[in-house]
Amino acid sequence: MKCREISSDGDVTVRITQCGHIDTNVGFIENRARGEALLIDAPFGAFDASVRILSAGVKPVAVLFTHCHWDHIGDAHIFRKLGAKMYAHRLDRPWIEHPQMMALVSGIDEQFVPCAIDVDVDDGDVLDINGWLRIMCRWCPGHAAGDLIFHMENLRCVFTGDTLFRGCIGRTDLPGGDEKLLISGIRDKIFRLPDDTIVIPGHGGTTTVCGEKIGNESLM
Ligand SMILES: [Zn+2]
Ligand SMILES: [Zn+2]
């Protein structure tokens, strides 16, 4: 499992690695000087990865969920037990709080531990993580009902979950799926970000806003 540095600004570094059954990208945004980190998604294996990737003494203080699907949530309960706050859209909250329901719908034979959500996130919310990280949140549904994208302007990156991938878009045949809504959300909310913004999807390689405007075949 490789860990890759995506960007940095002062004491803050963004790294990603892949965890779980279908190589879900997990984002680690760490402020070494403050001894705090934030995760984007927490699939199975994310806790072990955090021990390896985060600098000594750095504590995860928050987990932000791009959406509720089983491949993004398996280790969330571990981080919450250790004191991290959980952030998700209210439409995806029930699936994370009752994950066996999600496992059943997805036909996944895995034991999930429920994880309570502490903060409901909605379109346009700007999160301030303990004064060192500002995150613009947009609701971009159509893959799931509660898809969120997280833009960190100073770090020049956006986490798009399973809405937008390098060269394609997320599937829309699961509960809450809606292709028209997904495509309009990508155009209105992701493609209006600066062209050089690094796009970090829920799976697969990273790309840029400009690269997807030009080269995404699902949007031609
Ligand atoms: Zn998904
Ligand atoms: Zn996924």
Image (cartoon, rainbow, N blue to C red):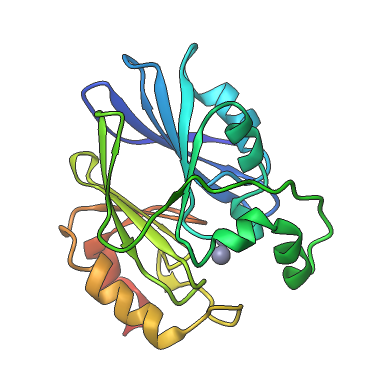
Left or right, 41 with reference to 115:
left
Q: Quadrant of the N terminus?
A: top right
Q: At 61% across and 42% down in the image, what residue appears? A: 76
Q: Quadrant of residue 201?
A: bottom left
Instruction: Using the image as rendered, state which of residue 120 and residue 169 is in the foreground.
Output: 120
Residue 43, compared with residue 101, is above or below; it is: above
Q: Quadrant of ligand 1?
A: bottom right
Q: Quadrant of the C terminus?
A: bottom left
Residue 88, compared with residue 115, is above or below; it is: below
Left or right, 202 with reference to 22:
left
Q: At 23% across and 53% down in the image, what residue appears? A: 197
How far across and how far down the image is residue 94, in percent?
Answer: 61, 62
How far across and how far down the image is residue 63, in percent?
Answer: 48, 41
Instruction: Using the image as rendered, state which of residue 179 and residue 80 is in the foreground.
Output: 80
Is residue 154 visible in the rendered image? The answer is: yes
Q: At 65% across and 29% down in the image, what residue appears? A: 48
Q: At 35% across and 80% down in the image, what residue appears? A: 183
Residue 117, compared with residue 188, is above or below; it is: above
Number of labelled discs? 0
Which residue, as the protein is rendered here, is positioned at the far right?
109
Is residue 69 visible in the rendered image? The answer is: no
Left or right, 105 with reference to 218:
right
